[in-house]
Image (spheres, rainbow, N blue to C red):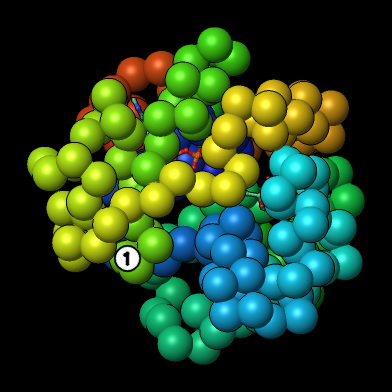
């Protein structure tokens, strides 16, 4: 089953993806994580992506689409058919969505559901500026909503938590503007295809996960 998690930055896509992975047979393709992995390994792709990400701009489609298919084809090769594949942070433009449709068709597959996080903008800034992530294992915390047991230390692996370069108020505003101008059109795009499911992103992570399971029947 192929599922897109669609929503503005800070809506809780990564948090829901982690919960699904803990509880179901699921794998995640998170384009932001793939870019950050390339940045920390100083690859050519990483160097090129970094200049866009630091400003909160979108990385160009030609650097983004191929790496999604690399990840997807690797998953298909290694896993059985009954897996859930979660697209987290992709697609973010109409062109990316078209490329995704085309590539799925070529593979005899389809996007089954698009989970849209309905959430107010004021909540997003608070969520993103308070986000802390583990550079080692990828766990995500929030200084108020979901603090680690020991301040500044990852509960899972004990590594010192960091704040992402792009999680500052100025960049966040640009990311939200870009979401509105380029990504939010995908809500109607998938509504028209009849595969959009809305969930209330303002609820707690547990309630979001429950609503996801109920509405998708998984
Ligand atoms: P996204 O992947 O959509 O950018 P994240 O899942 O990383 O968002 O969440 C952004 C921040 O908000 C994180 O610090 C996370 O701990 C926190 N968060 C996520 N979901 C919720 C929620 N349902 N309620 C409160 N805080 C949340
Ligand atoms: P968030 O959910 O908080 O916006 P992500 O980790 O999904 O964070 O994305 C971080 C940054 O990576 C984005 O601001 C953008 O620069 C880049 N990025 C991630 N996914 C895409 C994509 N599908 N297309 C273009 N740029 C992307
Ligand atoms: Zn960790």
Q: Residue furthest left?
A: 149
Q: Can I make out residue 62 in this image?
A: yes
Residue 208 x/y as whole percent = 34, 29
Vertical relation: 146 (above or below) 113: above
Q: Residues within 10 Å of mark 1 (few under 14, many from 20)?
A: few
**Nearer to me, 79 or 146:** 146
157 and 117: which one is in front? 157
Q: Residue at x 54, y 21 (%)?
A: 125
- Identified at 68% across, 27% down, the residue is 170
Q: Quadrant of residue 35?
A: bottom right
- Residue drawn at (11%, 41%), measured in percent from left and top? 149
175 on left or right of 201: right
The relative height of residue 42 versus residue 215 in the rendered view (above or below) is below
In this picture, residue 6 sits left or right of residue 159: right
Image x and y of residue 129, in percent: 48, 29
Confirm or reject: label 1 Cβ below 8 Å from ligand 3: yes
The image quarter containing residue 188 is: top right
Query: Can residue 215 be seen here?
Result: no
Query: SS at mark 1?
Result: loop
Q: Residue at x 75, y 29 (%)?
A: 174
The image shows residue 131, relative to residue 41, as above or below, that is: above
Q: Position of residue 161 (x, y in %)?
A: 32, 52
Tell me the residue that label 1 is attached to.
Answer: 137
Q: Could you tell whether 163 is left or right of 204 in the image?
A: right
Q: Please tell me whether residue 82 is drawn above or below residue 142 in the rendered image.
A: below
Residue at far bottom of view: 77
């Amino acid at each position: 089953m192929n599922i897109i998690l669609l929503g503005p930055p800070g809506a809780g896509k990564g948090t829901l993806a982690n919960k699904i992975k803990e509880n179901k047979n699921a794998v995640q393709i998170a384009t932001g994580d793939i870019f950050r992995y390339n940045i920390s390994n100083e690859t050519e792709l990483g160097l090129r992506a970094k200049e866009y990400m630091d400003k909160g701009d979108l990385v160009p489609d030609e650097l983004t689409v191929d790496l999604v298919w690399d990840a997807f084809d690797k998953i298909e090769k290694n896993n059985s058919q009954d897996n859930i594949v979660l697209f987290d942070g992709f697609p973010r433009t109409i062109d990316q969505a078209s490329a995704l449709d085309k590539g799925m068709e070529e593979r005899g597959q389809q996007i089954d559901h698009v989970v849209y996080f309905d959430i107010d903008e004021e909540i997003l800034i608070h969520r993103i500026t308070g986000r802390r992530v583990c550079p080692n294992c990828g766990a995500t915390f929030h200084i108020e909503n979901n603090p680690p047991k020991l301040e500044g230390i990852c509960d899972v692996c004990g590594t010192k938590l960091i704040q992402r370069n792009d999680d500052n108020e100025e960049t966040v505003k640009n990311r939200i503007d870009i979401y509105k101008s380029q990504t939010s059109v995908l809500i109607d795009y998938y509504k028209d295809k009849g595969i959009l499911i809305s969930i209330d992103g303002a609820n707690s992570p547990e309630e979001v996960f429950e609503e996801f399971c109920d509405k998708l029947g998984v």
